[in-house]
Image (cartoon, grey):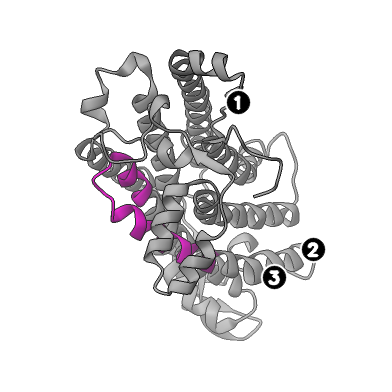
Amino acid sequence: MLSEPLCRCPPELSGDYGDGPSRFANIVLILASLPIIATIGVITNIISLFIYNSHSQLSSNRYLAALAGSDLIVCLTGIFVIAGDSLRSYSETADQLYVLILPKTVPLVLVSQMLSVYLTVFAAIDCYVSVSPTLDHWRPYYCRPTTANWMILSAVVLSIAYNLIAFLELETISCFEPSINATRFELCPTELRISDEYVQIYRGYMYAAVMAFLPFTLLSILTIAIVMALRTSRDATTADDNENSGRSSGNRPIVLVMVVLMFLLCNIVSLGVNVLELLKSFIFISWETQSILIDVGNVLVVINATANFFVYIAHSESYRRTLVDSLPMEFVRKLVMSRRSHFRVIAHTDSIELEPTSRCKSACTYLTIVLDGEQSNDTV
């Protein structure tokens, strides 16, 4: 009589992608593309963490440094957890290794992703408070490093607390595999994970609300509010200059909108997968299709964690200047600085300052740009 149960865990946890389209998609997206993207993200987020941490006297830099740190963890878990989990399908050694560590590392992926989401939200709130004319009395209290530290700590604690239950979703069991006539380890869902109530409430309704609808709604509202506040401030302070010069301001907060759009686009697939799981009683979706969607969603999340550096480097003159000053080679600095940007950061009259003359420096210093009034149509 067998001392261990037979290996009969669901195929979605076995690491076996079969021979269909899902296997090809997994190889291309997770095993080939994701490690490259994540490695770039590790490097760029370390750079951003260094730059913003070196100017941590500004409240906005505290948020952006923390965001770079959480995105760094997202990229690292992308390499060692997501890609490693997929490697199980192609290597018995990798499979037996990862089934032991995945129950403890998968929750870290969830914590880092949630932390990045809400640090983005908090950075946007900091931006809005700093530019809103109706919140002048709040500015000295909210837009300061001490408050930023407390908000970051709150995001860390909440992200960990919310995802603690994920440590109870998976378990490693020892079972007998008849095909190889041997005992092996297998990754299986716990009774909690396969509970219909748990799947519908926590993995469905709560995830959709906490990780999608709530941050999407907040970021959209904050973006619109920031645009309106900047427009009001700009109209009030530059109306005479524009009338005399005959030039239109045409100012648009491009970068913050780009960050929000990147967040929406890169997380919409993951949201869709959870909604489909929630509605599986009404909408049929094959395991093959679901596997592909999960792989696409994982890659997009890592792309989102990597993209901020390129947004900063393309549109923030202050970020580029700090980065160039940090380069060790003189000829590299000259090469980078020889390319004049066609963009400029919104300055003093728009309630956003480049120089450290105020304690309340918002994330808009790095996330908001406008086209230069004298700019040509040349590409950047």
Q: Real-space Cα distance between discs 2 and 3?
A: 10 Å
Q: Secondary structure at mark 3?
A: helix
Give the amino acid at mark 2.
Pro
Q: Which residue is mark 2?
A: 21
Looking at this view, name the residue that lies furthest to the right: 20
Of 80 and 190, which appears nearest the observer? 80
The answer to whether 250 is drawn above or below residue 73 in the figure is above
Q: Nearer the viewer, residue 102 or 83?
A: 83
Q: Which residue is mark 1?
A: 250
Q: Position of residue 259 (x, y in %)?
A: 54, 41
Q: Earlier in the sequence, mark 2 or mark 1?
A: 2
Q: Could you say where residue 122 lies in the image, as x and y percent from the top left?
A: 37, 35
| Residue range highlighted in magenta | 38-66
**Quarter-wise, where is residue 257 in the image?**
top right
**Earlier-in-chain disc, 1 versus 3:** 3
**Amino acid found under the numbered disc labelled 3:** Ile
Q: Secondary structure at mark 1?
A: loop
